[in-house]
Structure formats: structure tokens, C-alpha cells
Image (cartoon, rainbow, N blue to C red):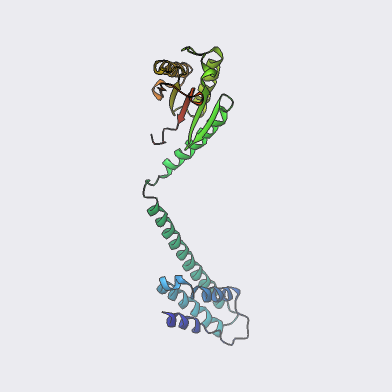
């Protein structure tokens, strides 16, 4: 193969015409000389050979009809043929790269255009939601989900199951943000209580928060509640509202 490629280079005689060759022919010669030594020449030798025939024609016309329109046109055809071959090589490399990426990402199925658009819109809306509720409590964003966390004392008095008046205002604001930025998201309310045997209290608090969100317009079918019971350390005495896009795996 190396001998053949060397022959391709040697066969591109420049001749001895006194008229300067067309600019297109000079560019085609220079690029061909580089391409013929590349790895792509070894993978598509037949395609590059066809380009060489076109370049030979341009060289021959330059020798026999220097400065003529025929020679100019042949030079342009040779450059166009070479540009097409180079484009095909680039596309082949891109296909190989895409196939390698797809093979490496075997755990997830490729998304079609509609799925990609929905996924992008979901990420954008959940980001806007996180920014909107940032002043209501502690906010954390992870894997596209927003967690809004309150210390228990922010929503409930000690031992109480009823929300504070100010807490209802906060939750109504959170519900308004959900309706605006992520109306179809899954919402999970998780509550805990400070009593050593606080499972019942925690469950009631989670339901109270859920009911407040539903009363404020969050679709009831999208909201679930759960609780942590038993003795909890101070940093676990809290209420969390986790908002997840519907396209996020459970």
C-alpha cells in the first residue's frame, strides 16, 4: 500500500508550462499531497484514486491548454472532487465516533428528537422551579429533582399536627411555583417528628402538608406523603418536599 500511495504522489507531474497554474489546481495539488499520506487514504484508496483521475485531467489540460477556460474548469472539478472525498471521510469519522458513543452508553436507550426536547424542557423548568422556591426554605437540586426542606419548627409547633398560619403561606407560594414551572411533576412529602415514638405525628404532618399543597392547586394524583418515625436527632426533625420531573426514573 505504501508503494502505491507513493506512486500516486509521483504520478502528479507538474509539467513545464510557462503559464501559472490555476489557483484551484494549486490548492487541489497541495491538499491531495497531504490526503494521500493520511490514514484515510488507506481506508478509502479507491475513492482517492477517482480523485486522482480528475486531478490528472486537470494537470493534462494545464499542460496542453494553459490559461484556457477548459483548464480552469478542470481545475475546479478536481478541487470539488477532492473536497467531496474529504467530506465523506469526515462523515465516516463522525459516524464511527457516534457509534462508539452509543456502544458505550448501552445502559440507556437513545432518545428521539421529541424525547430530547421534552427532557431539555423538563430540566429547564425544574431549574426555574428551584430558583423560585429558594427563599421559602433550604433548597437542594440533584439529578433534576428539587428538594425543599423545612425545619419542623418552621411549619409546626412542637407536638402539633396543624400547620402554622405562616407555614401555610409558604406552602401556598411553593404550590404556585410548582403550578407555574412544573405542573406535571411528581411531588413527595416526607415528614419527621421530635417525639421518641413520633411515627403517627410524622405521618399526620406529612398529610397536612400534602393537603395544603393540593388545596393550593397541585394535582392530588401527583402528590404522595410519607414519614420517618422514632427518635430523631435535631437535624432530622424536618419536612421535605421533593419535586421530580415525570421523565426522571423513580
Which sits in the foreground, 158 or 24? Answer: 158
Which sits in the foreground, 68 or 213? Answer: 213
The residue at 53%/74% (across/down) is 34
Which sits in the foreground, 91 or 124? Answer: 124
Instruction: Tell me the quarter of the image containing the N terminus.
Output: bottom left
The residue at 51%/72% (across/down) is 77
The residue at 56%/81% (across/down) is 62
Where residue 127 appears, x then y in whole percent?
53, 34
The residue at 57%/31% (across/down) is 131
**In screen coordinates, is 66 left or right of 198?**
right
Q: Is residue 107 above or below residue 230?
A: below
Where residue 248 appears, x then y in whole percent?
42, 36
Where residue 158 appears, x then y in whole percent?
50, 14
From this viewpoint, is residue 6 visible? yes
Where residue 151 appears, x then y in whole percent?
53, 22
From this viewpoint, is residue 172 visible? no
Instruction: Tell me the quarter of the image containing the C terminus.
Output: top left
State how many labels appear. Answer: 0
Amino acid at each position: 500500500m505504501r508503494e502505491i500511495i507513493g506512486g500516486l504522489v509521483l504520478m502528479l507531474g507538474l509539467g513545464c508550462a510557462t503559464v501559472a497554474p490555476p489557483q484551484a489546481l494549486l490548492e487541489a495539488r497541495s491538499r491531495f499531497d497531504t490526503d494521500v499520506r493520511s490514514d484515510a487514504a488507506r481506508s478509502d484508496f479507491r475513492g482517492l484514486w477517482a480523485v486522482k483521475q480528475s486531478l490528472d485531467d486537470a494537470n493534462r489540460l494545464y499542460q496542453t491548454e494553459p490559461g484556457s477556460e477548459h483548464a480552469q474548469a478542470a481545475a475546479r472539478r478536481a478541487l470539488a472532487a477532492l473536497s467531496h472525498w474529504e467530506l465523506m471521510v469526515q462523515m465516516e469519522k463522525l459516524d464511527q465516533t457516534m457509534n462508539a458513543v452509543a456502544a458505550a452508553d448501552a445502559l440507556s436507550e437513545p432518545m428521539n428528537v421529541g424525547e430530547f426536547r421534552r427532557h431539555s424542557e423538563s430540566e429547564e423548568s425544574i431549574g426555574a422551579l428551584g430558583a423560585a422556591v429558594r427563599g421559602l426554605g433550604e433548597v437542594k437540586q440533584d439529578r433534576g429533582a428539587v428538594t425543599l426542606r423545612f425545619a419542623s419548627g418552621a411549619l409546626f409547633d412542637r407536638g402539633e399536627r396543624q400547620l402554622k398560619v405562616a407555614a401555610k403561606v409558604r406552602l401556598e407560594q411553593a404550590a404556585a411555583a410548582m403550578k407555574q414551572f412544573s405542573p406535571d411533576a411528581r411531588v413527595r412529602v416526607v415528614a419527621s417528628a421530635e417525639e421518641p415514638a413520633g411515627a403517627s405525628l410524622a405521618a399526620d404532618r406529612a398529610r397536612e402538608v400534602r393537603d395544603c399543597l393540593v388545596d393550593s392547586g397541585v394535582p392530588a394524583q401527583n402528590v404522595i406523603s410519607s414519614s420517618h418515625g422514632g427518635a430523631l436527632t435535631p437535624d432530622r426533625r424536618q419536612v421535605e418536599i421533593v419535586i421530580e420531573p415525570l421523565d426522571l426514573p423513580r
